Image (tube, helix red, strand yellow):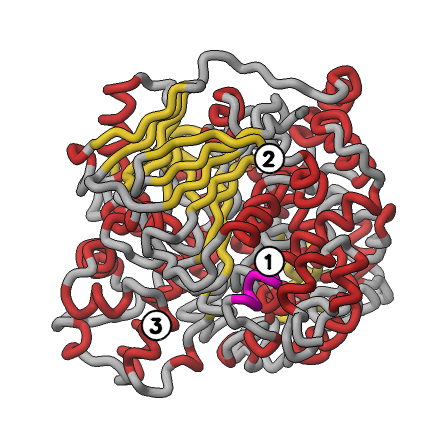
């Protein structure tokens, strides 16, 4: 096989068995790699009725075909399976340095089942794969565990580590690479914790990759790397990170404030933006493997109550989720809260969303000090967030920790009051930090139909609405007006396919905006030999989207679950989008029609599935017709 | 007539806050073109906190915020 190695590692922690397996080539040409290939394997082998935190649950790590190439943005990895947070299909992607090392070691992915008898790590050194008891790392923060593992094995050993939150099965626990890059969403840190697996460590002896057409690939690389590096967006993010234009987002009404109750807070925009982060706290810029954009931040807060030593700094989502969303405009506090989340192993988006919901519930009196163990939940009280709330969540300690460790939807259900209305989530996944009412109405549709729940990277809708990319070869050559529903369903049809391609190829969305459709096709063909034209590629993307929909259907999710909570659909109360109503149902109905999806079941029709070469899959969901 | 331009966010890199003399019938769209900002930046003008259309005409003393739709993830 080319690009891909074709080989995966199957681990059964119950039996202590480790086997390698060669996957059929057709799996790749149909489902691409990354989260698409993971969905195919889950569909084929997953136990649908298994609790995501039970030994039977599958934990899948999967590379895309480009991992290991010296190409900006090409080396992300996907983790996938059933999300413990949502109970649905879940996937999450991570940059950093794990994906290329796994590829060089000879593997496309790892499937883990079972549960180790005691806390363990998985060590991969080329063909040598071992599960090693390692209780010494259990209970440690990700930073300490990462350092200790690197000290023992070598600093070039690449790590995936969970923190105490993963060990304690917090449902939005993350998995961290090199102590900096996160598989952030959907709670796979808890799945790893449920398997008693603290870390996966990989080291390859070489850096070999076999490509289908090395010359053609080199031509493309020579064209793409400078194009990506010199793009204006890359320049902006290199200089001031992904929060570079947060202030602009505040004026547009895109940046959520106090649990999405407000869309405008001018001073906050001036305090929390990436330029201020650079000025006050940035010490270094960092990049994922081979990426010239280098959007990652390293920060140090030298003094004050939120002083932290030099280390990973926050990106846009973290700055907003642990800043404006919970009523704070204290950037030093955000840096510290982000660092604490990293070390405890908690997703900053779901943590921010859940805490913001709790602060509103406390303000309304829907939860009281009786529910929080005496802790007052006040907007912007960062000392309490950092010293009490986050540690209690990670430890599942006290009544507040127990209440919030399962995410906002679960916490709202537990209150037995009418508090779900002001959770801000779709399918149980907290909405990321772009408010469709100010960011673009198409984003509301994208959040709702995303198989894993509210997600801004499941498709490039955000970038398409803001006019950051155009794809004339596949019919996207028109400008969108973000604040209307016009052409949004039509665009979403293209966007879900493109998003599935990106997430299956494990390409970074900041880098791949610069890649034109013929270049995408050229990459798949020259690297992996898929022998595609543009329609083949788009068809594979749509197929992946459809398959994830089918998996969710088996979990009991239907069209009615493609929804957003009222808070994010009610007219904004202030700022630019004040009073504007999103025509959500109109966009959704049109999208369903264009995608050939059943308006009740929420899955593609049998005919549509057959058209996409999914006749076998169709039989499982359309049995009765 | 004079309007006052306020760049917001990443636009600050390309221009400073300043008064600008414009013709009375100048539209927001033409004003944006004249600012010579990079093509890749989709620009929107805001007046009193609200977006204005490219066809909008200004009045003396308007404070116009110049914003890019650029967003990080
Ligand atoms: S743009 Fe940023 S997140 Fe994406 S690959 Fe490069 S450094 Fe990593």
Q: Is mark 3 within 8 Å of ligand 1?
A: no
Q: In the rendered structure, which segment of residues is drawn in magenta?
A: A549-554
- Residue closer to the observer: A308 or A450: A450
Left or right side of A597 for B29: right
Image quadrant for the N terminus of chain A? top right
Q: Disc 1 is attached to a residue of which chain?
A: A
Q: Give the label, 1 or 3, closer to the camera.
A: 1
**Residue at image x 66%, y 56%?**
A545
| Residue assigned mark 1 | A548
The quadrant of the rendered image in which ligand 1 is seen is top right
Can residue B9 be spotted in the picture? no
Residue A68: quadrant of the picture: top right
| Residue assigned mark 3 | A410
Left or right side of B46 for A353: left
- Residue closer to the observer: A130 or A271: A130
Q: CA distance from mark 1 to mark 2?
A: 20 Å
Q: Disc 2 is attached to a residue of which chain?
A: A
Q: Main secondary structure of the magenta part?
A: helix
Indicate the position of residue A484 as horizontal and vertical percent values.
Answer: 73, 72
Residue A175: quadrant of the picture: top left
Q: Is residue A36 above or below residue A567?
A: above
């Amino acid at each position: 096989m080319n690009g891909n190695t074709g080989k995966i590692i199957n681990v059964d922690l119950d039996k202590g068995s480790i086997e390698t397996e060669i996957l059929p080539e057709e799996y790749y040409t149909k489902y691409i790699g990354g989260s698409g290939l993971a969905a195919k394997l889950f569909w084929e082998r997953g136990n649908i009725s298994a609790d995501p935190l039970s030994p039977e649950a599958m934990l899948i790590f999967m590379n895309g075909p480009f991992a290991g190439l010296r190409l900006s943005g090409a080396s992300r990895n996907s983790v996938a399976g059933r999300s413990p947070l949502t109970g649905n299909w879940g996937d999450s992607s991570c940059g950093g340095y794990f994906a290329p090392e796994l590829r060089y070691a000879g593997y496309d992915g790892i499937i883990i089942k079972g549960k180790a008898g005691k806390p363990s790590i998985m060590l991969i050194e080329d063909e040598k794969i071992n599960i090693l008891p390692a209780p010494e790392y259990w209970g440690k923060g990700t930073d300490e565990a990462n350092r200790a593992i690197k000290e023992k094995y070598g600093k070039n050993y690449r790590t995936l580590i969970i923190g105490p939150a993963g060990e304690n099965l917090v449902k939005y626990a993350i998995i961290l690479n090199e102590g900096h890059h996160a598989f952030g969403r959907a709670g796979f840190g808890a799945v790893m914790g449920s398997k008693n697996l603290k870390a996966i460590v990989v080291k390859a002896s070489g850096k070999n990759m076999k490509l289908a057409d090395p010359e053609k690939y080199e031509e493309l690389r020579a064209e793409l790397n400078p194009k990506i590096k010199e793009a204006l967006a890359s320049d902006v993010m290199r200089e001031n990170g992904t929060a570079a234009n947060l202030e602009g987002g505040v004026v547009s009404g895109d940046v959520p404030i106090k649990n999405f109750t407000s869309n405008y807070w001018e001073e906050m925009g001036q305090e929390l933006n990436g330029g201020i982060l650079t000025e006050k706290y940035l010490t270094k810029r960092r990049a994922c493997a081979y990426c010239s954009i280098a959007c990652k931040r390293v920060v140090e807060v030298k003094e004050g109550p939120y002083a932290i030593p030099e280390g990973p700094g926050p990106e846009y989502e973290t700055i907003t989720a642990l800043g404006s969303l919970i009523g704070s405009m204290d950037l030093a506090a955000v840096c510290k809260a982000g660092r604490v989340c990293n070390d405890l192993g908690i997703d900053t988006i779901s943590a921010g969303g859940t805490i913001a919901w709790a602060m509103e519930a406390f303000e309304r009196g829907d939860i009281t000090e009786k529910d929080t163990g005496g802790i007052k939940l006040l907007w912007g009280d960062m000392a309490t967030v950092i010293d009490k709330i986050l540690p209690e969540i990670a430890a599942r300690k006290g009544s507040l920790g127990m209440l919030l460790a399962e995410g906002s939807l679960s916490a709202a259900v537990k209150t037995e009051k009418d508090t779900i209305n002001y959770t801000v989530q779709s399918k149980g996944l907290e909405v990321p930090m772009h408010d469709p009412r100010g960011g673009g109405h198409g984003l509301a549709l994208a959040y709702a139909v995303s198989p894993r729940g509210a997600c801004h990277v499941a498709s490039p809708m955000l970038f398409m609405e803001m006019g950051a990319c155009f794809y004339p070869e596949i019919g996207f050559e028109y400008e969108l007006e973000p604040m209307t529903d016009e052409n949004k369903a039509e665009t979403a049809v293209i966007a879900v396919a493109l998003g599935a391609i990106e997430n299956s190829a494990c390409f970074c969305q900041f880098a791949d905006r610069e890649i034109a459709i013929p270049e995408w096709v050229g990459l798949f063909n020259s690297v992996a030999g898929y022998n595609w034209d543009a329609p083949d590629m788009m068809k594979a993307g749509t197929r992946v989207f459809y398959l994830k929909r089918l998996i969710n259907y088996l979990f009991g999710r239907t069209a009615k679950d493609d929804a957003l909570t009222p808070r994010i659909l009610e007219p904004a109360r202030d700022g630019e989008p004040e009073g504007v109503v999103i025509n959500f149902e109109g966009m959704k109905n049109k999208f369903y029609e264009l995608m050939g999806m059943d308006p009740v079941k929420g899955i593609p029709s049998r005919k549509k599935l057959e058209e996409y070469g999914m006749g076998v899959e169709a039989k499982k969901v359309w049995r009765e017709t | 007539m004079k309007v006052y331009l306020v760049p917001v966010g990443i636009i600050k890199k390309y221009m400073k806050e300043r008064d600008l003399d414009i013709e009375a019938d100048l539209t927001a769209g033409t004003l944006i073109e004249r600012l010579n900002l990079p093509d890749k930046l989709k620009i929107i003008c805001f007046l009193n906190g609200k977006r204005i259309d490219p066809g909008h005409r200004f009045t003396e003393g308007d404070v116009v915020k110049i914003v890019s739709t650029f967003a990080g993830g």
